[in-house]
Amino acid sequence: MNSTTSRPVIDADLILLDVDAGADKQAVIERLVGRLADTGRTTDPDGLTAAAMAREEQSATGLPGGIAIPHCRSPHVETASVAFARLAPPVDFGAADGPSDLAFLIAAPESGGSEHMKLLSSLARALVRKEFVASLRQAATPDEVVALVDEVLNPAPKTEPAGQDSEQPAAAKPKTLVAVTACPTGIAHTYMAADSLVAAAKDAGVTLHVETQGSSGSTPLDAATVAQADAVIFATDVGVKDRGRFAGKPVIASGVKRAINEPAKMVAEALAAADNPTAPRVEATGADANISAAPSGGVGWGTRTRQILLTGVSYMIPFVAAGGLLIALGFLFGGYQISDSANDIALQNSLWNLPSGGFAQYLGAVLFSLGSLAFSFLVPALAGYIAFAIADRPGIAPGFTAGAVAVFVGAGFIGGIVGGLIAGFAALWISRVAVPQWFRGLMPVVIIPLFASLVVGLLMYMLLGRPLAWLTTSLTDWLTGMSGTSAVVLGIILGLMMCFDLGGPVNKAAYAFATAGLTAATTASFEIMAAVMAAGMVPPLAMALATFVRPRLFSEPERENGRAAVLLGACFISEGAIPFAAADPFRVIPSMMFGGAITGAVCMATGVTSRAPHGGIFVFFAIGNLVWFIIAILLGAVAGALAVITAKQVAASRTSEVDQTPALAAA
C-alpha cells in the first residue's frame, strides 16, 4: 500500500477554526477543497469542487443544529478525507432552521473500499449526538477536533458490566420496529437518518433495528427480526432493495431528511400504525413500490394512479429517445426518402455490397431501420411497465402482451394505457389467490403471466380493441387535421401542457401524444412534435435569462441553477426549471406557461416540423423551417423571463410596502 492510501482520514492541517470562509456554500466548499489540495489529498481541486457542488444540487446538505456535511465521491481523491471548518459567520447550506457554523467536507474516492465508507458513515452518525457537536464548538485547537473525530472513527470496544444480562426478559420486551434508510449518494444521510431513528426509538422505549442501504454495503435485516417487527419505517430517497421481505407490515414512508429532522414523530407514527388495522401495509408484490412520503405512510388512489402511469411513461421514453434519434440520423445520412425503402436496403445490402447510393445511403437505411424497430416497442413498453408498477415482475409479460395487442388492433397508446392497467390489476388479483405452498413457486413465472395475459388478451381482442382503435383514430385525425387558426390553438394548448408541471404527468401526456404521432410520419405529426419540443425548451431557458437579467430577484442557489439551466433547456430537459418552480410556484409556473404558449403557437403558425422526438439543439438537422423554430423558442424564453421578472418585482414591491407601513404609522 502506498503512503497516499495509508494516510489518516483527518489531520490538523485539514481543520479551520472560526474562519470567514465566504458568503455562500460554494465558497466554503472551495476553501475546504483548498485545504485538501494543500496537503496533497486531491489531484484536481476544481474537479472535486464540481463534484461536491453537483451533490449539493441533488439536495441540500445542511442539517438541523447548525451542521453541514457537503460530500461526494470523486476520482480526484485517492483516499477518503475529511476537512472541517468552524464558520464565523455561519453560511446557509439549506437547513430548515438556518445557516450552519460547522461544516465537514467528506471526500471519498470514486472506487473507495467499504472500509473508507464505514469510517465516513461513523462520522455522519456522530453528528446526531448533541454532546459531540457541542465538543466541536468548544474545541480550542485543531488537534482537539482531530481527537474528537478520531474517537468516533475508531471507537473503543464496549463491554457489558459483569453479571448483567443484556437481554430483557421476554415479558418486558417493548414493541419492535424495523427501518430501512437509503439516500442517493449513500455516504452520510443514510446513516444519519438511521441513527436519528435509533435515538428517537430509544427515547420512546422502543426496539428499532435499521438496515442502512448505503455505500459501505448493506447487511440485510435478519428474517426473524423482520417477522417479529410490529411496523416498518422506510426513510429513503431511492427504491428499497428487496421490499417484498416486509410484506404485510404496517408502513410509514418518507425521505431521509424527514427521518433526520423528525425522527420522534416518525417513530410515533409507526407505533400508531402498528396498532391500527387499517394502516397502510407493504404489499406482497411490487404494487406499492412507489409509496409516497405522506405523513400517514400511504397514498391516495389519485396519486397512486399518477405514479403508475408515470412509471409506464418513464420506461417508454428511452425507447422514444433512442428510436427517434436513430430515425433522425437515418434521415441525415440517407435523406428523407429513405423511409420508403430502408428495410429493403438494410436487408439486401452490406458493407461488401453497397447500394447505388453508396455508404451514406446504406448507413441511413440501417439507422432508420434500427430506429423503427426501437419505436415499435413504444406501446408495449408503456403497457408493460404500467403493469409492472401495479404487480411487479409478474405483470411485465401480460403488460407487454396487452401493448402488442393494442398496436395490432390499432388502439395506439390509449389502448396501451388501458391494456397495461387491465394486465397489471389482473396479475395483482391472481397473485393474491390463495394456493398451496408447493404451488407458489409456479405462480410468478407461469400461472400469473399465463392467466393475466389470457384475461387482457381476450378483453382487448373481443371487447375493447375496436372501440379504443376508433377513439384513437378519431382523436388523432381531429388533432392532426387542425389547420390555420385551429393549429395555432393546438400549439397554445400543447405549449401550456408542456410548461404546466415541467416533466410531470401533464407534460408527459403532451409528449407521449406527440411521439406516438411520429409513427404516422405525416406533416401534421411532425409539426406537433416540433411545437412540443420547442415549448419544452422554454422554461429552463426563460429562467436562465431571468436570473441573468435581474439576479437580485433570485437567491444564490437559484442563480447557480440558472447557469445550469441554459444547457438543460438547450437539450430539451424541461426539468431544469423545477428548482425555480418549487421555490416560487405561483409566479414561476404561470410565467413559464405564458412563454410556452407563445412558442407553441408560433411553431404551429409557421409550419415548423421535427422528425426527432428529443435532442433540442443537437437535432437541428431534423428540424424543418429551422429559423422559425429558433425564433419561436427565443420569443417564448423572452416572454417567460419578462413575465417572471414582473411577477417577482410586483411581489417584492408589495412586501416592501408592507414592511414600511409600521414605520410610516409611527412617524
Image (tube, helix red, strand yellow):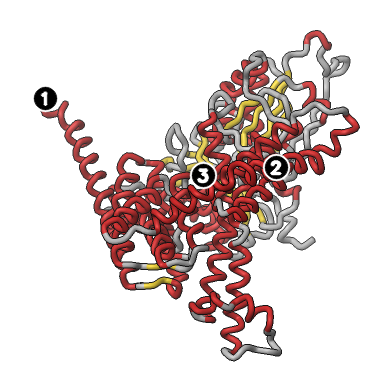
Q: CA distance from mark 1 to mark 3?
A: 43 Å
Give the camera-side residue of 445 and 168: 445
Give the camera-side residue of 174 and 455: 455
Q: Are marks 1 and 3 in contact (CB under 8 Å)?
A: no
The quarter of the picture where residue 195 lies is top right
Does residue 349 appear anywhere in the picture? yes
Residue bearing the label numbered 3 = 59
The residue tagged with tag 2: helix, strand or loop?
Answer: helix
| Amino acid under disc 1 | Ala
Q: Earlier in the sequence, mark 1 or mark 2?
A: 2
Give the camera-side residue of 75 and 534: 534
Does residue 35 appear anywhere in the picture? no
- Percent across and percent down for residue 375 are 59, 62
The quarter of the picture where residue 649 lies is top left
Q: Earlier in the sequence, mark 1 or mark 3?
A: 3
| Amino acid under disc 3 | Ser
Q: Residue at x 49, y 53 (%)?
A: 512
Q: Residue furthest top?
A: 171
Q: Residue furthest left?
A: 667
Q: CA distance from mark 1 to mark 2?
A: 68 Å
Q: Is residue 586 placed above or below 360 in the rendered structure?
A: above
Give the camera-side residue of 163 and 330: 330
Crowd tier of the residue under label 3, counting other residues whose Cα lies within 10 Å: few below 14, some 14–19, many 20 or above: few
Q: In the image, which is nearer the foreground, mark 2 or mark 3?
A: 2
Residue bearing the label numbered 1 = 665
The residue tagged with tag 3: helix, strand or loop?
Answer: loop
Residue 395 — which label? 2
Q: Residue at x 68, y 29 (%)?
A: 282
Q: Is residue 615 left or right of residue 376?
A: left
| Amino acid under disc 2 | Gly
